[in-house]
Amino acid sequence: MIEFLAGLMDNEGDWTFGCNNTTESGHIRHHSDLTPLPGQQRVGPKKWGVSRLQRIFTEDEALLPDYLKSDVLPREAGGDLSYQEVSDNMKKQARKPFSHTERREWLSKHGPTFQKMMTGDYGEGIQHLQFDIGDVCEQMDPQSRRKSSLFRTNDIDSGMGWLPGLGAIRTDVKFFLYPISSRNFDANIHLFMDIDDDPVRINEINHFLLGEFGNIGGRSCQLYLFLPGLYSPRSKGNGVKDQLKDAFISRCFIPAAEEILKGDVVGEFLLEQFGAGMREAKNDSESAMHEGQIYGSSGSRLTGGVGVHQKFLARLWERCMIKLDGLLDNGDEGLLPFKGCRLFWSFKGFKYALAEADDEDLERSLEAKVNFPFFFPFLITGLQSFR
Amino acid sequence: MFDMSQIDEDEFHVDLGFMYGLPSKASDVLEEPCVGYTTLPRRCCLKDLVRRFNELIPDPEVAAKIKGNYYTWGLTKDIASLTIEFPSGHPFREFGLSYIQVYPSHKNLLECQGHYPFPLDDDSGICLALDSHGLKSLYSVVGRPVPDLGVCRASFRSSGARIGVSLLSHFHRSLHTRMELRVTETLRGKVRAEVELRRQRRLAQPVEVILPEAGCPFYIHKTEVINGFMLASTQVPARLFQEVVSLAAEGHLGIDHQKFGVETFQYLKVLHVAVLLQQLPYLNKAAVPVRPTPREIEEGLDEPRDEMGIGTEETIDTYGYGYPKHGQFDYVELNFTTPRIAEQFPHPSHALSNIKARPDDRRRLNNLFQEIDFVIGRLRMNEDRDAQKVLLAWLVIRLLKQFLMDVTIYMIEGPYEFVNKGQFARNIRDEANDGDREGRSPTPNGQRRSPIPPAIANNRQRSGHRQRARGTEEIATDHEWQSPEPEVQHSLGYSKLTGVIDRRHSASVRTTTAYEATA
């Protein structure tokens, strides 16, 4: 397994998968089939495309969809207009009825053309599409077809995993006192968790966005709190009710923060921020009916975000969990779903973030960008003004 | 950013990505833009990759074979994307490998913040093709506002422009094939160590001679060629769709043209992307088996039947490209080749993907529309007066049946009270039970007959629950309890009947008020 994956990821080696790639020769061999087919004509993508394009890109543009006519195309796409003009024209055109051909003209002239294009039959047999016809690979020297020649970059564009506690994070974290469910995972992330000995897809387990941290290429990592205790295969959705989140934040997290932050200069400032974060939500002129639910111009903004310095994180989470256990031991049923809760981080970068030309460069890039401790600039500014 | 000494590396997953392709190069012609190359994965080689993974499974008896999902790219036979999700408990997942995907990054030309043009749940073209009464009725059933057709047109143009402009303006860029593996940090470390060993071994070995016929698992074409292919593939059906929906005033297409327009739009939506065709049966298959509805089962019509689809699976296999199956569509007449074929295509509303609520009510409405459309189509074609009389009589009986059913449901299951309501309900139930005792056979699935089909009754109960949860009073404008809009295009009689229903509705409100006053 390791050997196979190493073969797959070793970009200085050669292809380790592909047709007829036997272990003896180690090479891929494709045989282009060009034997005539009855009633068909073998064509490559070039001829296939040109035979249609030359029929719809006529001089009067009568057969183009409305949005491809030169009066709405930018210069870059062969039109006459600047992007500003394109945008204005498209807005004007947007709600107008579609242009179409006169029925008689369609029946006599354009209909038969479309019949040919849609069936691929221009009178020389139905076009049989083959991508090996005109394949540039065939014209290249064998050396250029090797993996080492075709390999361009490698990258890490996303990551995720479980955290034992906040102490495993080496940067400051911004916590959301009023988390909302719209930031939850809405698609399969291909990871499982065992609940009552049954594997459950992680994205189906109830969770909420607790905070965010770090900065990789301008994007932050998301910090989620997962509640396996709340999961039921019969319930719909993966959200957590506002009163539950509020119970956890107000009865465990904030009291823990008060205990840990008190008596420290930075901590006192942060406590002030906690208060400000909570006031921010409550003072909203179009105030929400439920906590975490934001109306009006603020949209889906997460209010009450408070940055906590990295040095407090380990103790803060430890204290928070002790408080949770204490309340559970005292029979606080409102917090029962938080029993066995787990922290999960996830990072989704821009397309192909951290792309590098080889493994060594990627490692260096990871060291520099991912393992570099990041401090919130506002925290430093805030501290200066505090002093 | 992380203190890795505290983190279990088996629970730390990263997506490793690899890009393969040719870089763009300067043109031979002076002042011409660069020449870009697009690299596309060969379906045959992706199958080989899956086969190799399966060969690695230590004990095939214990671990299930991996199948891999092949996404058909641009309805072509040769090119595909691949995803492999290793099931929970699979030995490879235990090793730390959870997911693999290989795909052409050509799609990035069309991407914007994770959104692509003509997404599969885009209903804009379907709303433009459907007749306005049908559209209103369908949205009324689920209690949602009818889509604005101006917005639908704008959406169609916007999606089309995003494809067209991108393809026409980005032919000088190289677009590579991407392979992505989701692995744990533990596995990444092990593989890196093995790769390093291989490098060292390679350094010690003499330079390998490459055979002239040695290939690679990709097709490589100039980006201009691929963009041209995709432009030709997408813009012809796009224009065709414009022509079909313009055959009549908006919302007034005949049923066959509606079906033709909807099928063209569904076809258009998959031409620029890689899709799992198996999940789109009406696009993939030429004959789609349809399970009988609960009502059909109750009425004894439990024979499975087939509906027709575009049938691209067959043409992809035969012609290397997914043309709509030959002989079904007449692109000169902009219609199906025969009325018989048109009838066998599903009602155009089947394609609406954004309406999910109240499936039983929607099915009931669709069935009604389908039956009425079918009979009206026959009425238009048949010139025999006697046959017309029979069809008209059938139409009247069908509408009366629907009317009686709707009124019965409305009166018995609705929230309004009237004198002896309970007694009426009991009488209807008793009559139905007597009917059963007198020899009417029970339904095939063992359910007892009731004056209200069970599916509808269940649906009504659910609606009631929702209404209570909402805590609203029922008012005359509440969509949930409104009858379908009059089908002006189909039958004047039906609109009269709905008028009667509306008047009955007002009457029942008056009855309730009078009853409450008496009480």
Image: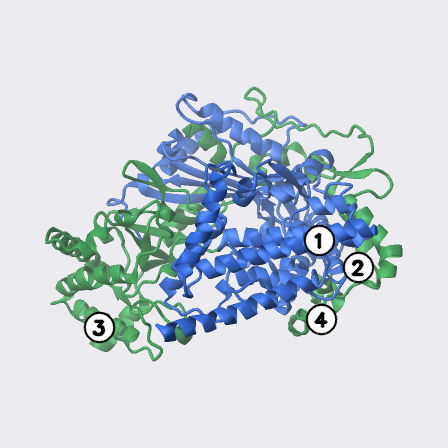
Q: Residue at coordinates 20% horizontally, 73% vertically from top-left?
A: A272
Discs 2 and 1 carry the same chain letter:
no
Letter of the chain that mark 2 sits on in the rendering:
A
Mark 4, chain letter? Answer: A
- Choose mark 3 or mark 4, whichever is in front: 3
Q: CA distance from mark 1 to mark 3?
A: 75 Å
Measure the C-alpha gap from mark 2 to mark 1. Answer: 45 Å
Residue kind at label 4, given as amino acid type: Leu
The chain that hosts pointer 1 is B
Q: Which mark is residue B393?
A: 1
**Quarter where residue B513 is shown:** bottom left
From the image, tell me which residue sits under label 4: A81
**Kind of element beneath mark 1:** helix
Q: Are marks 4 and 2 in contact (CB under 8 Å)?
A: no
**Amino acid type at image mark 1:** Ala
Residue highlighted by disc 2: A63
Residues under numbered marks 2 and 1 in contact, where contact means CB atoms less than 8 Å apart: no
In this figure, which residue is indicated by the disc labeled 3?
A275
Lower sequence index among marks 4 and 2: 2
Q: Nearer the viewer, residue B53 or B319?
A: B319
